[in-house]
Amino acid sequence: MLKLNSSYLGVLVAIITVSIWAIFIVATRFSVSTHFTVEEVLILRLVPSTLIMAPFMIKYDLIPRGLPWFKAGMLMIGASAIFPYIVSSGLSFAPASDGGVLAPGMLPFWTALAALFILGEKLDQVRRTGLLIILIGALMVGLWQIIFNSDEGVWRGHILFLIGSGLFAIYSVIFRQSGLTPLHGLLIGLFWGTLFITPILLLTGRVTFTNVSAFDIGITIFIQSIIIGILATILFNYGVRLIGASQMGAFGALTPILAMIGGILFLNETVPMIKMAGIFLVAIGVFLASGILNHKNYQNKKSK
């Protein structure tokens, strides 16, 4: 019974997390297409988060021990620095609805592959079908933009979205295997991510905050640092511990719908019918790939 309750709690955590991911996609697209550079957005995400969480860092060991260098490196900078930098860069080329599909929307595939090769985790037929449907829907959206969009830079955004999504999937599986608590994982990522990437961002010469008001900076810090940088990371790591990396990643496919709605309402983006059909296919796929049906079957068997 405890396992079942944990599963449903994991589903709730996943829904909240992907809602925040959609906010990240829409808010970042707005920021990098108006007054901010990608580097400025990432600085406002990392530095305030690290300062806020600094008192907690004193109590934790911030070096992942007993892990190969690649796994330790992914825990240190994968989710906090590399993923947001790559995806934010992609959003400077492509619209929010594309980012929602090809970044968190494709996360289930990369997570399933990473879990297979790293953990030996296998999927049942229902979840494999769901992942296939997600892939078809994502391809409908991605190929439509590549073939019919006149902006030559869109394909660059698509590639960056896919790379970022793949790296985040690897991080999620490694985190699950590490045994770290959600808070501990966040603190490690913030400390090393900020220490590693802040000098690089400053050296680009693109962190000037010219023509940016104090109000815009404050709002960006609240959204990027507190809501996305801290809250979403803790919730994601907590969800991975509750329902596993593959199922948590599958819920990421809900983000395209939320990002599409946000793009239409706040960014005046247009969504062709074939693209909308692909997004809703992704939603169907996530329902199957999430494993919810398996939990219902488990509950029915327990009640008999």
Image (cartoon, rainbow, N blue to C red):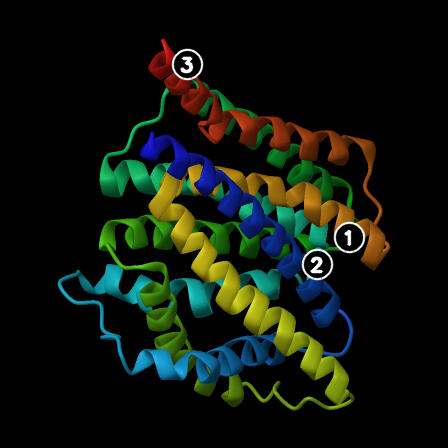
Foreground pick, 210 / 2: 2
Asked if residue 276 lies left or right of residue 173, the reply is right
Q: Earlier in the sequence, mark 2 or mark 1?
A: 2
Position of 253 with respect to 234 (left or right) is right
Q: Where is residue 68 in the image (x, y as percent from the top left)?
A: 17, 61
Judge left or right: residue 56 versus residue 141.
left
Q: Residue visible at 23% across and 54% down?
A: 179
Q: Position of residue 151 (x, y in %)?
A: 77, 55
Residue tagged 3: 300
Residue 237: percent from the left, percent from the top?
39, 54
Q: Are marks 2 and 1 in contact (CB under 8 Å)?
A: yes
Pick whichever of labels 2 and 3 is earlier in the sequence.
2
- Secondary structure type for disc 1: helix
Where 285 sits versus 201, above or below? above
What count of labels does the image hold?
Answer: 3
Residue 99: numbered disc: none
Choose mark 2 or mark 3, whichever is in front: 3
Q: Do the residues labelled 2 and 3 touch (CB within 8 Å)?
A: no
Residue occupied by mark 1: 263
Residue placed at 32% from the left, 48% from the top?
173
Label 2, label 1: how far apart the Cα atoms are: 6 Å
Which marked residue is nearer to the observer: mark 1 or mark 3? 3
| Residue type indicated by callout 3 | Asn
